[in-house]
Amino acid sequence: MRPEHLLNYGFTPTCLAALARLASLLSTGDGLLRLFDPCCGEGAALVHLGKALLEKGAQVETLAVEIEQGRAEIAARYLDKVLNADFRRTALTHKSVSLLFLNPPYDAAGGEDSLENVT
């Protein structure tokens, strides 16, 4: 892991192009959709995906975990429920979420220049 990632718990936001592409592929289904991000950072990814689903007529609830307190506090302003904790010490019940957004640490330049190649 790069030194700058070590300083911020490996935080690299998902690039907007990847989020836009993913949002375009989502469908609404029936009932409440629970979106979960176990490493949410400031919550931008779930905000983006949640808004896209709301625009398609879905009912959405956003749930997240963030280890770093400052980012968890920011995410809590925009998401429905945020837990400031290590996701490895949390548990979900069976079938409790509709979508798991898991953005693993891509160890490249980060941000818009990360290895998340969107074509």
Image: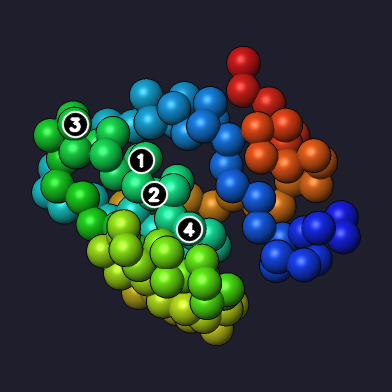
Q: How many C-alpha atoms fall within 10 Å of the one at disc 3: few (<14), some, or many (≥20)?
A: few
Q: Give the CA distance from mark 4 to mark 3.
A: 22 Å
**Secondary element at tag 2:** helix
Tell me if 79 is positioned left or right of 38 in this view. left
For residue 42, the mark is: 4
User: Mark 2 — residue?
Assistant: 46
* Pointer 1 or 3: first along the chain: 1
Residue type at the position of mark 4: Glu
- The residue that disc 1 covers is 49
Q: Residue at x 70, y 65 (%)?
A: 8
Q: Earlier in the sequence, mark 4 or mark 1?
A: 4
Q: CA distance from mark 3 to mark 2?
A: 14 Å
Identity of the amino acid at label 3? Glu
Count of labels in the image = 4
Q: Are marks 1 and 2 in contact (CB under 8 Å)?
A: yes
Q: Which residue is situated farthest in the bottom direction here?
A: 89
Q: Nearer the viewer, mark 4 or mark 1?
A: 4
Give the quarter of the image for residue 36. bottom left
Label 2 and label 4: CA atoms lie apart by 9 Å
Q: Marks 4/1: CA distance?
A: 14 Å
Rendering coords of residue 71 (x, y %): 51, 66
Q: Is residue 1 visible?
A: no
- Residue drawn at (23%, 57%) of the image: 61
Q: Which quarter of the rendered picture does the C terminus lie within?
A: top right
The residue carrying pointer 2 sits among few (fewer than 14), some (14 to 19) or many (20 or more) residues within 10 Å by Cα, namely: many
